[in-house]
Image (cartoon, rainbow, N blue to C red):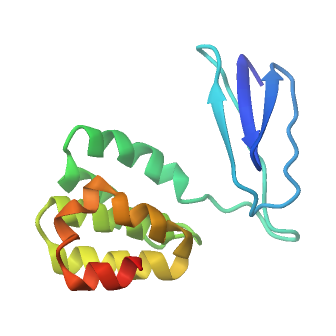
Amino acid sequence: MAGHATFAVAGEEIDAPSGTLVFVPDPATKRGVVAREAGTTVLALGARRGAAYRPRAWETNVDVFPMFDEGRYEEAKQLLLDALGQYEDQGTLLYNLACAEAQLGNPDAALDYLRAGLEERPDLRDSAGGDEDLAALREDPRFAELVR
């Protein structure tokens, strides 16, 4: 739409000056985008065939990460709880709720959310083992069971 960005699609970098269209035929493909100049605007479109677009969990998670960086875990937790049920992909919301609960000193709730998040997104298991937001859980045998 405006500006300049670099897309990463399935490990391939795509230079995208203003007006570039990037088509990703498989929605399961790992992808991302980084603005290369201020004021860059990217329009993302997508939906399942025959269905209207439904927002995805990243739309909440993008607001949660700065809260974590600033130690605002209670606020992040509330934002994540409010987002549950809004998205069909809840795995990362549940994972981030586990991180918030761990930081707030609630290991039982953290492990419950982590279990639910990993059931939906088993690919996050590797990240969980080294995630500093979950460090308080590492000595708990239930955590070891979840991340192996």
Residue 122 x, y percent position in the rendering: 53, 76
Query: Is 147 situated left or right of 5 in this image?
Result: left
Say which quadrant the N terminus sits in: top right
Residue 89 x, y percent position in the rendering: 57, 69
Query: Is 31 situated left or right of 119 in this image?
Result: right
Residue 135, quarter of picture: bottom left
Q: How many marks?
A: 0
Query: Is 85 situated left or right of 65 in this image?
Result: right
Residue 108, quarter of picture: bottom left
Please say whether residue 81 is visible from this viewpoint. yes
Residue 63 x, y percent position in the rendering: 41, 44
Which residue lies at the image location 37% right of the left edge and 82% below the top edge? Answer: 146
Q: Is residue 127 above or below residue 3?
A: below
Please say whether residue 43 is visible from this viewpoint. no
Which residue lies at the image location 61% right of the left edge and 16% below the top edge? Answer: 39
Which residue lies at the image location 71% right of the left edge and 16% below the top edge? Answer: 3
Residue 18, quarter of picture: top right
Residue 26 x, y percent position in the rendering: 84, 61
Say which quadrant the C terminus sits in: bottom left
Q: Is residue 88 above or below residue 112?
A: above
Q: Is residue 14 above or below residue 25?
A: above
Frontmost residue, 8 versus 3? 8
Frontmost residue, 12 versus 17? 12
Query: Is 6 situated left or right of 26 in this image?
Result: left
Which residue lies at the image location 66% right of the left edge and 36% below the top edge? Answer: 33
Frontmost residue, 78 versus 21? 21
